[in-house]
Amino acid sequence: MHPKSHNDWTYTIISVKIRCDGMLIKCDFGIPQKKRLEGAFNLMSVNKTLATVNGNAITDKDVEALLQSLGPQRAAQFQSEEGRKRVLDELINQQLILAEALDNNMEQEQAFQDELKQIKDNVLIQYAIRKLMQTASVSPEEVQVHYEENKTQFLNPESMKASHVLVDDELTANKILKEIKGGMAFEEAANTYSKCASEKNGGDLGYFSRGKMVQEFEDAAFAMQVGQISKPVKTQFGYHIIKVVDKKAAQERSFEEVKDQLTQQLTAMKQNELYMSKSEALKQKYPVKVNA
């Protein structure tokens, strides 16, 4: 693996900025409040000045803030001394660009003002939506009632455990089946003859529900009883000799099992309803004209 050049490091840092309607910005509005606070507290303990550009200090906090904005996977590339130096170099470069832009009064240019307004509008939209979504809540009683009224939706489906021996042709399958009936252990037969990777485990396929296996295999397996061994079953993969090891009937999942997932689902439903109803209400408040 070749070491990264300075340009590679710079591109990696810059490329993680969020593109917002043609302009690169960095924003943390999608980060949970708890994470943002944790990050802020971590940064408070580090404040060493590493460089100064045109009178503006670049500190350890700035380096850490940029690293955190990269995400764990990308940030890991910069945790070495050399990596952190690359981050500092990039921050210096950005401050130099900023200094010249201010000297040239670029912030007064109309193109910049237009992009700035667009960015501010987009950030404000996301902020307003997030505040709206935060008003949607689901009480424990609502979750419980929904569970009781929709128990059939919360089932662990019927499942079974089976083993098999897979070969290419029916003649070979029938010969193996004869050996099994003659006393050869099914697991030994699978280990000796099967071309499936499961042969290492005696043909064990583990537990599976309907829809997980090819149709011909599924139909034959679920029609069998525990302990039964099938005649050769043809599928697109070859010929299977199936042994049913165990069966589990469909089981109702307890409220505790589904409570967290159900709460999230109901909250999402409420948020969607809230968003749509708010949008309809605002159409009555503000004029909307759609051009054909």
Image (cartoon, helix red, strand yellow):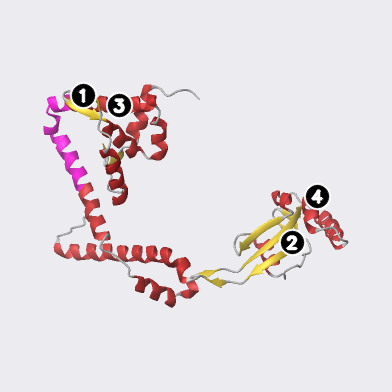
Q: Earlier in the sequence, mark 4 or mark 2?
A: 4
Local crowd size for mark 2, using a 10 Å CA cut-off: few (<14), some (14–19), many (≥20): many
Q: Amino acid at mark 4?
A: Thr
For the record, the magenta segment spans: 100-121
Q: Identify the residue position indicated by label 2 in the image.
A: 242
In the image: residue 76, left or right of residue 32: right
Which one is earlier in the sequence, the residue at label 2 or at label 3?
Answer: 3
Of marks 1 and 2, which one's residue comes earlier in the chain?
Answer: 1
Query: Around disc 4, counting alpha carbons within 10 Å, would you say few (fewer than 14), some (14 to 19), or many (20 or more)?
Result: some
Q: Is residue 32 visible?
A: no
Amino acid residing under circle 2:
Ile
Quadrant where the C terminus lies?
bottom left
The residue beneath circle 3 is 88
Q: Which mark is residue 192?
A: 4
Number of the label disc, if any, that sits on residue 52 = 1
Q: Earlier in the sequence, mark 4 or mark 3?
A: 3
Give coordinates of residue 198: x percent, y percent.
Answer: 70, 51
Kind of element beneath mark 3:
helix
| Residue 51, quarter of picture | top left
